[in-house]
Amino acid sequence: MDLGSDFWHTTSLPTHSIPPLKCTDGPNGARGSRFFNPVPALCIPCGTGLGATWNAELLQSAGALLSHECAAKGAHIWLGPTVNVVRGPLNGRGFEGFSEDPVLSGVLAGAIIRGVQGSGDTIAALKHFVGNEQETQKVSVDVCMSERALREVYLKPFQIALRDGRPVVVMASYNRVNGTHVSENKKLLGEVLRQEWGFEGLVMSDWFGTYSCADSLNAGVDIEMPGPSKQRGEKALIAVGTGKVSQRTIDERARKVLELVNKAATSRVSPVETTRDSPEDRALNQRLASESVVLLKSSESILPIEPEDCTDIAIIGPNAKLPAACGGGSASLRPYYTSSVFQGIQAQVPADAKVHFEPGVFGHVLLPYFTGDHVTDESSQPGVSIAFFNEPESIQGRKHFDYQNIPDTTYQLMDYTHPEKSDVFYISMRANYQPEVNGCYEFGLASYGTSKLYIDDHLVIDNESEQAHGGMFFGHGSSEKRGTYDMLAGRTYRLRVEAGSALTSKVPGAFISVPGGACRLGGSLKLEPAEGISRAVTLAKRCKHAFLIVGLNADLEKEGKDRESMSLPPHVDDLVAAVLDAHPDAIIITQAGNPIAMPWRHKAKTILHSWYGGNEAGNAVADVIFGKVNPSGKLPVTFPDRLEDGPTFLSFGSDNGRVYYAEDVFVGHRWFEARGIEVAFPFGHGLSYTTFAISNIRMLASDVLVDIQNTGSMAGAEVVQMYISYSSPQSAKKSRFLRPVRTLVGFHKTFLEPGQKAPVIISLDKYSTAVWDEKCDSWVCEAGTYTVSVVVSSGCLETELTVESDVCWEGL
């Protein structure tokens, strides 16, 4: 009972009328159960994009939307939200988390959980508990930190989310914490989560994240996912028989699974995976995306622009036509639709406007894969043909046992099944391609399993004879091998990939085995950077308005591999600098889920930052550019000037199997403020097309009140942020704890019409002044005088709070 039956379902017991429960990946949508040829799905902005909204009420609405989407996908359990702290810029999966700040992360996670679980049809699985802040060696790395940092920074967002959202499921992380894998950690799962916090729900393993039988059962992991089980079943019988696990423990684990089944028994979910792409869903998703956009710089108020003024415009950059919907890995899905910034701008300018495009340079790490916009299948329809065999291509007369059409030249087969499929099987992917211009084209092939590319039956890439590890496909895939082929515009070329399944792979094996296999074929015209930049500069010079879109993509930010630097892809900074020299008023639009370096930021007059914005990513940016939406996003993470300035520069990755969280409680903005380090753009920063002023700060019992007024000429929203510091001008007493300069304790987003004035109330509670006292092994609200600071973009107001005596507490 305490194990999964397949990749997405729990085990059913038909003789006892116990049905299976279905899980689906989040956190920025509900993919459904299929990695291979999945049903299209809603895609909301990534975690940091949601964090940039600073809008808990809006995220609760997003949670309700996700619940409807889960029901359409037949899923009872949504594997989200991700509430791990965005500790540094290089985490390949950092875009899934909300923020570098535990309070912002926890409050937003609690809100989206309330929305997901509000209807009673969907269960949220809060993840990844705890310390999963990197992809490097994530299943084995020992995350070492002080008890105070663990409590105040890394456990705290889980604690707040449990208090505010009451998730039914918590997912244990892959890594170790202070020497012990979390899935075997009695202190974290038993003492903290269950006893101290009173969690009564189910603890689920991360996928393939159960590494033992007895230890994980005794620690408190109720269900091993996915199935078939590797660590339970027969092993559990032996563990009970030898006294390593008690019958009572087995009963406890089984009881939690049965309680989960009972909670989901009345869920109204579709018996088959379906779609629900409604105008109302699109409108809410557009609001999520637009509220996430951050206006980083506006030194000459060039924005917003009147669409009618855009008669001859240049759209430049490697990300201009990239529909930056989501990052890579388990967060990725097939969106209902996408919108690139190019498409968003083009849709809003006059129909007779001249819209010119130059990529300048390419920003991809992997060559972009071919979609139905570029290739046709063997029936001349948009897409790709794919056939499955039990014999390799060398066998004459082999016959396929399955044949399908898929939308693009990528596939993942971890959930692919067929009654005639052998353990080792083979795949033939075929498409017809017509290049737009003459030239030398470069192709790239990466796979989990062996693969070869043929063009018109000429071998172009051999990714079979030798393979190197590349970090793709959840860390199992090969590196991308490349080859070139001269092509003529308008001629049709036959692309054919012959591949083997996962068991044919020659890549050094990972600990977690994933079945099936995967493949990705990409390609594009080969572009020399100097030539591309020259063409972009020429275009920028002759157009009144120039938009330059650069950033990262799902090749760089993905599950399975961390980034190596904060830099944009090669030659992109050169492109930005050259275009700004040619057109100083060019509007820079950046796309990334984590902080990026901007060495050209002082030269730029206008910088907009967007994230992986879901279905509406490009439309949202265009709405901000043309003033349909007044930007209100605030950075949920600090953008450092240099990676070397940040708290994780010397403590990220692996030091002989360990990573030391040496910055302790000084994570993110706390680090930069404590050390007085100038940053590119600080935590909480974000500009507007209007102005706001605050006044009349006062306290009423445990509430802090302040009046805020829109003093500009355009309706907009401002985030009121509240921080607390131990000290005041009237008190010379020092804390016995080493504290941050200030700590975020609350926030509220307010929408105001021009001239409108309204009060904002933010409450203080026991969390606001609490520090983890390692000597007492409890929270303590230390006696003393505190400065309460209320901050908006235009300034700060302060008042004081006095705690008369130490107050110790535990629990939620």
Image (spheres, rainbow, N blue to C red):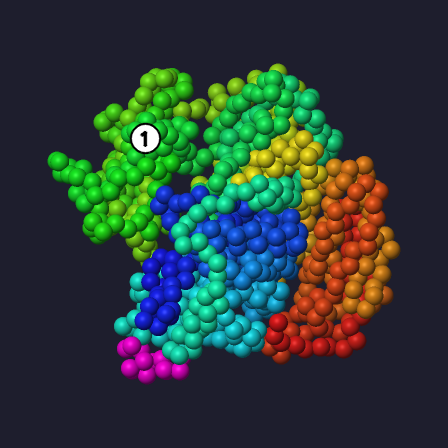
Residue 776: percent from left, percent from top: 62, 79
Which residue occupies 83% across, 61% down?
Answer: 799
Which residue occupies 56% across, 39% down?
Answer: 617
User: Furthest-right residue in view?
Assistant: 696
Q: Is residue 248 magenta?
A: yes
Residue 130: percent from left, percent from top: 50, 64
Tell whether 248 sits left or right of 651: left
Give the quadrant of residue 588.
Answer: top right
Is 182 above or below relative to 239?
Answer: above
Residue 511 visible? The answer is: yes
Give the quadrant of residue 784.
Answer: bottom right
- The residue range painted magenta reads 237-249
Residue 161: percent from left, percent from top: 59, 63
Residue 142: percent from left, percent from top: 45, 63
Q: Nearer the viewer, residue 801 or 379?
A: 379
Is 231 above or below relative to 448?
Answer: below
Tell whether 688 sits left or right of 230: right
Is 46 above or below relative to 443?
Answer: below
Looking at the magenta stretch, what is its main secondary structure? helix
Q: Is residue 683 magenta?
A: no
Secondary structure under the numbered disc 1 in the rendered image: loop
Tell whether 143 sits left or right of 693: left
Which residue occupies 36% across, 24% down?
Answer: 441
Disc 1 residue type (three-letter): Asp
Tell whether 270 sits left or right of 546: left
Circle 1 packing at 10 Å, graded few (<14), some (14-19), many (20+), is many
- Residue occupied by mark 1: 377
Viewport quadrant of the C terminus: bottom right
Which residue occupies 49% across, 75% down?
Answer: 190
Q: Nearer the viewer, residue 128 or 744?
A: 128
Q: How many marks?
A: 1
